[in-house]
Image (cartoon, rainbow, N blue to C red):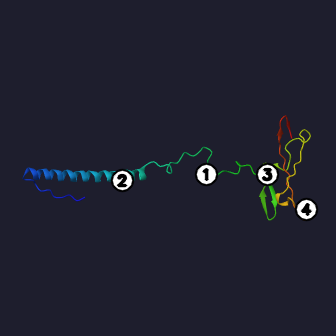
Amino acid sequence: METAEIPIPKTYPEALAAWQLQRALNAAIQEELQGLQQQLDWLRRQVFGQKSERRVPPPPVEQLSLGQDFSADEAPQAPLRSVAAHTRRASRHPEDRAESLPFFDEGRVPIETILLPAPEAEGLDPGSYEVIDTKVSYRLAQRPGSYV
């Protein structure tokens, strides 16, 4: 804001008018200063303030640093199995083959077979389609007072 040249007053009305002008200019400068101070505070918070993206939590104890390498002794190797054109590690997850083998004693738990029809084959004559594959899975269910 430009400051206006205020003449030196010679009479009381001129002094009063100069004082009012000076007071208005002072108020305008004060208002502009407050606006600039708010902008500066906002900019300082954006540049130097603490932000959630900038906080880096301390790494957990078991996590490796970027340059650290783990040795082959630490990780157990899964047995190898042959696959056409290359060698692949055998699956270490027992859940992959769990459905095809019963995990309970068949002599102590009665087995009940539940056949689920394919929704696509409902209402069709059995001679009009060919069964390509079946899936067998074992589940342990409980009835009140017994296991099946």
- Depth-wise, is mark 2 or mark 3 nearer the camera? 2
- How far separated are the C-alphas under marks 4 and 1? 64 Å
Q: CA distance from mark 1 to mark 3?
A: 32 Å
Circle 4 packing at 10 Å, graded few (<14), some (14-19), many (20+), is few
The residue that label 2 is drawn on is 39
Task: Confirm or deny contact between disc 2 and disc 3 (CB under 8 A).
Answer: no
Q: Residues within 10 Å of mark 3 (few under 14, many from 20)?
A: few
Q: Secondary structure at mark 1?
A: loop
Q: Which mark is residue 125?
A: 4
Circle on res. 38: none
The image shows residue 14 at horizontal and vertical percentages of 10, 53
* Mark nearer the N terminus (2 vs 3): 2
- Which element carries disc 3, helix, strand or loop? helix
Q: Amino acid at mark 3?
A: Asp
Mark earlier in primary sequence (2, 1)? 2
Q: State the SS at label 4.
A: loop
Quadrant in which the N terminus appears: bottom left
How far apart are the alpha carbons under marks 2 and 3?
Answer: 61 Å
Residue tagged by mark 3?
Answer: 96
Identify the residue at horizontal 86%, vertical 36% (top origin). 146
- The residue that mark 1 highlights is 68
